[in-house]
Amino acid sequence: PPPLPSLVPAEEDAESDLPPPSAAAAGLESIPIAAAMLADSGIDCQSMGLQGLITLTDSYKIGKTTATRASAEIVTGSTPQAAQARDAILAHVLAPADANTITTKSSPKSKERLSGVVTGADADATTTAQLRTLALTILSNVLANLTQTPELVALRPVLSQAVLPALLADLRTATANPRGADLAVRALLPVLETFDRDYVECELIGHGAYELLIEAQNVGEARYDSLREHSSNCLRIIDESR
């Protein structure tokens, strides 16, 4: 049988704002392939699907226009496959680091399935952390691509109810997991750049985000330069809006 299409479309022309039609089309065609992998309960398939979406939403690797189009497709769930990919990404992002994870297809029937993610009390924490890191990378890419767009504004309910609390929880573990905290801060930056001061005060500052960002900045200064840089940018935006 013919091989599956690649998850990675052709790169855009760096000198053009518009991608070749084939590149943009290939980007959108990659989403159903990734969604099928994320719907599989096998760890390898899940990982490959997430890695493909990381590349597809990385504006530096694939080009800004294609990455933004793919991000909008995923966020809006404009097709059943895009919605399936979105829900699987969120399921990984929201999975507690010490509890839920995917397992193999031979998992007991007692385990629960959520958007292709099989969860269970005996799940492997290392696998959870690895897959969650991939999902957080996608989330930070997508939010950055959609900064100050209607698509990001439309995410306000799910951000408030689920995503922002999860990101703040990552900041609380900055000392133990600076990489996870860095991805969380990268995801927070587009939120700060997009939403008004009242929203930021209510959903972030009111839940200790400013203090957590200072702590993350301190961790970054000692151990993780990217965390220091992104935390400093977030703090600067908050200070300038006050």
Image (cartoon, rainbow, N blue to C red):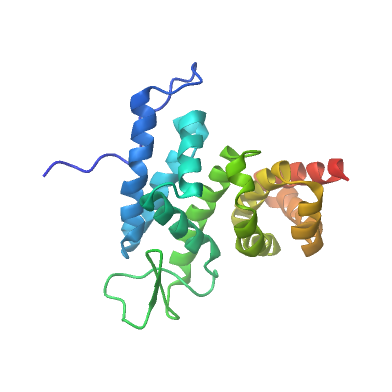
Outermost residue toward the top? 15
**Which residue shows up at 31% across the image and 47% down it?**
33
Q: Is residue 53 visible?
A: yes
Residue 58 in percent (x, y) is at 49, 38
**Which residue shows up at 62% across the image and 38% down it?**
149
Who is closer to the viewer here, 227 or 134? 134
The picture quadrant where one finds residue 102 is bottom left
Question: How many numbered tags mark residues here?
Answer: 0
Who is closer to the viewer here, 192 or 45? 192
Q: Is residue 225 visible?
A: no
For this view, does 51 lie left or right of residue 99?
left
Residue 128 in percent (x, y) is at 47, 66
For this view, does 216 lie left or right of residue 139?
right
**Which residue shows up at 47% across the image and 72% down it?**
100
- Above or below residue 195? Residue 205 is below
Residue 120 in percent (x, y) is at 42, 78
Dividing the image into 4 quarters, which one contains the N terminus? top left
Dividing the image into 4 quarters, which one contains the C terminus? top right
For this view, does 131 lie left or right of residue 213?
left
Outermost residue toward the bottom? 110
Outermost residue toward the left? 1
Residue 229 in percent (x, y) is at 71, 42
For this view, does 232 lie left or right of residue 129?
right
